[in-house]
Image (cartoon, grey):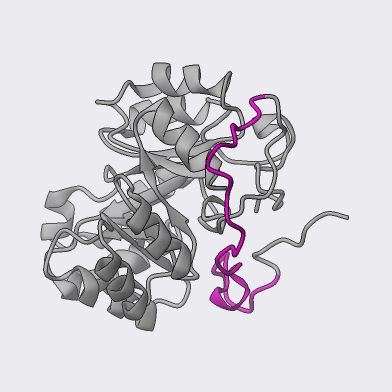
Amino acid sequence: MAAPDPLAASPLPAPHAPSVTPGPSSATPDPSATPDPSATPGPSAAPAPLDLFGASVLPVAVVADPADAVPLARALVAGGLRAVEVTLRTPAALDAIRAVAAEVPDAVVGAGTVVSAPAVEDAVAAGARFLVSPGWTGGLLDAMRASGVPYLPGVSTASEVVALLERGVREMKFFPAEAAGGTAYLGALAGPLPQARFCPTGGISAASARDYLALPNVACVGGTWMLPPDAVAAQDWGRVERLAREAARLGRRGPGRHGTGRHGTGRRVP
């Protein structure tokens, strides 16, 4: 039986409802286990964030003024990008997440640049519905897993990917994408590690996004190109909406993508 469409299960247009987010796994992974490269991707022991984005592009926002958060999120949603990652790089970030969570119900707001257990707690308390980190440690991974919300730990090497697979995590952020080897590196990982799925972020543009999305192990890309600093500074939300609409058309997911019409977690693509 096909898994239910997460969009249809929620009364809101948001593609994922917190009340049905899988909780943290209680299973203790065998540290000596080696992932089977021939295995067909299946459900991850960790919550699966890539299917809740609802599009192949994840906007990454650095918000300097909390007053910009709500109109920025509304412009992205109007353009077809409902998920937005607000990076914890500015003092305004948590207030921005709090405002979007409260005032833009159609948006799925998450926190990026999560690098500590206290940051995990603060982001979730502010209303973040997913977490993204540029890298990971055992402590940070435990904190993200215990948070009860979907998370994407960051990797940039094959060893880091294998270590996460051993811990039951199959969905990862590849960062910094361009500096770490770009499409050539990610494409090379698809052969020996087909069960890993990635959201590459870092240096990706509207022009290069298509190349990443053509890879069999890439579910989405993260980027800032739909949020030009001059447009945000000028509060030109119409321009942001137009760029978001163009980005939302990239790599439309559907039957045939990644070979099956489904992503590795078994959830039907919205």
Lateral position of residue 245 relative to residue 4, left or right: left
- Of residue 181 and residue 135, the one placed in the foreground of this image is 135
- Of residue 259 and residue 170, the one placed in the foreground of this image is 170
Residue displayed at 61% across by 41% down:
253
Lateral position of residue 202 relative to residue 149, left or right: left
Q: Is residue 159 above or below residue 134?
A: above
Residue 261 belongs to the span the image colors magenta: no
Residue displayed at 30% across by 52% down:
60
Residue displayed at 29% across by 26% down:
178
Lateral position of residue 176 relative to residue 191, left or right: left
Residue 13 belongs to the span the image colors magenta: yes
Q: Position of residue 49 (x, y in %)?
A: 52, 55
Q: Is residue 240 visible?
A: yes
Q: Position of residue 74 (x, y in %)?
A: 36, 68
Lateral position of residue 99 relative to residue 230, left or right: right
Residue displayed at 20% across by 57% down:
62
Q: Position of residue 145 (x, y in %)?
A: 47, 62
Magenta highlight: main SS: loop
Q: Which residues are magenta?
A: 9-37
Q: How many marks?
A: 0
